[in-house]
Amino acid sequence: MTTMTLDLSDFHWTMQLLDTLDAGLVVIDRDYRVCAWNSFMQNYSGIHAEAIMARACFTVAQICRKAGYVQS
């Protein structure tokens, strides 16, 4: 196995682990875009990751606030 294969395998394992946490997980990049939205967040908010990924976290907060998941 090459180093690249191991790195990719580690990445997939890490993403699976984060996705199965019994807690909400949102990862934001340096430009304030959502990079990860785990299954807990999907189930809690009813918002699928595909609808949130790469969107600005400020937009996501507005969506969640309107849905009643975040209070001002």
Image: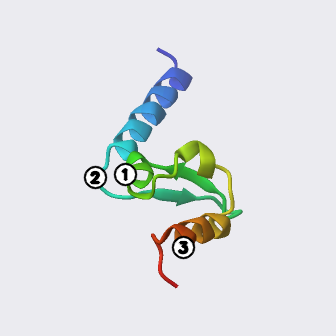
Q: Residues within 10 Å of mark 1 (few under 14, many from 20)?
A: some
In the drawing, what numbered circle is on residue 22? Answer: 2
Any mark on residue 5, and which?
Answer: none
**Residue 7 appears left or right of 28:** left
Q: Which residue is mark 3?
A: 65
- Residue in the picture at 67% in, 66% down: 59
Spot the residue most to the top.
1
Q: Earlier in the sequence, mark 3 or mark 1?
A: 1
Instruction: Say which residue appears at 52% left-offset and 24% top-offset.
Output: 3
Point out the residue furthest to the left here: 22
Mark 3 vs mark 2: in front: 3
Residue annotated with mark 1: 40
Residue at 37% across / 51% down in the picture?
Answer: 40
In depth, the one of 37 and 32 nearer the eye is 37
Q: Position of residue 47 (x, y in %)?
A: 51, 52
> Which element type, helix, strand or loop, lies under badge 2?
loop
Residue sitting at the far right:
31
Q: Is residue 52 above or below residue 1?
A: below
Mark 2 Cα shell of 10 Å, populated few (<14), some (14-19), many (≥20):
few
Rendered location of residue 1, percent (x, y): 46, 14
Amino acid, disc 3: Arg
Badge 1 marks a residue whose secondary structure is helix
